[in-house]
Amino acid sequence: MRLIRTLASFAAVSAIASTAGAQPAADETPAQNTIYAEGLGAGLLYSINYERRVIDELGIRAGFGYTSFSASAGTASSKSTWLTVPITVSYLGLHSKKATFEAGGGTTLSYWSGAASSGLSRAEGSGLTPYVVAFVGYRLHPVKAGFNFRIGAMAIGGKGVSFSGDKPPNEFGFIPWGYISLGGSF
């Protein structure tokens, strides 16, 4: 009787161990590629992004955002451009078939250039500023292919970052931020 209990226990433990490490069935594997537009978020204003799930629980994203501003009055004029490049890594391990909790972080490279003129004088300048980003949110991610939706909260940090504008330029600060995105996964 003791031998039967030992064999039954061994069989039960073996069955649990073999299913615990099993990979999801091919029809349950999340879509590996996503292209999406994100409002606010790591692109700061907006960005167009590509994300690749390198493994089931880890996604790597790169994107870009571009904005141009100009103004003129009489003989005075000004123009500036702003390019952002968000690069992030997301942990996607807490998920059901389509719903996913995401948490991650990375950096956003922000490049500004501008020029202004008035009558006989002209000035121009440019610069690159890196920001750190950290985020948590909800993701609706299809199993094979289809609609992708993300929404969440994030923090953006960097030198001189604040809502008030009174932070010294070399002092590191954080601001709360949000994001929402729509796209397609395949």
Image (cartoon, rainbow, N blue to C red):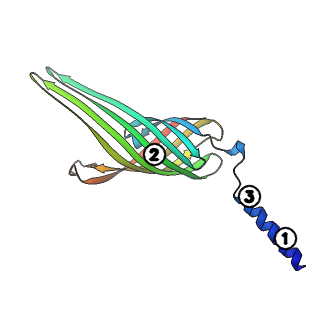
Q: Position of residue 8 (x, y in %)?
A: 84, 70
Image point (39%, 46%), residue name: 107
When asked about the image quadrant of residue 126, the answer is top left
The quarter of the image holding the N terminus is: bottom right
Question: Dot 3: few (<14), some (14–19), or many (≥20) neighbours within 10 Å?
Answer: few
- Of labels 2 and 3, earlier in sequence is 3
- Badge 1 or badge 2: first in the primary sequence: 1
Mark 1, other Cα within 10 Å: few <14 / some 14–19 / many ≥20: few
Please tell me which of labels 3 and 1 falls first in the chain: 1
* Residue positioned most to the bottom: 2
- How far across and down, in percent of the image, does residue 168 sit? 20, 51
Q: Amino acid at mark 3?
A: Thr
Q: Can you say whether 172 is above or below 52 in the image? A: below
Tag 3's secondary structure?
helix
Disc number for residue 8: 1
Percent across and percent down for residue 131 are 34, 46
CB-based contact (under 8 Å), mark 2 and mark 3:
no
Between 4 and 154, the one lying in front of the other is 4
Q: What secondary structure is found at the residue carrying circle 2?
A: strand
Residue 19 has which mark? 3
- Distance Cα–Cα, label 3 vs label 1: 17 Å
87 or 72, nearer to the observer: 87
Residue type at mark 1: give it. Answer: Ala
Mark 3 and mark 1 in contact? Answer it, CB < 8 Å. Answer: no
Q: Amino acid at mark 2?
A: Thr
Left or right: where does residue 182 sit relative to residue 78? Answer: right
**Residue found 28% across the figure and 35% down from its top:** 112
User: What number is the disc on residue 20?
Assistant: none
Reply above or below: 97 against 112. Answer: below
- Circle 2 sits on which residue? 88
Whether residue 117 sits left or right of residue 46 in the image: it is left
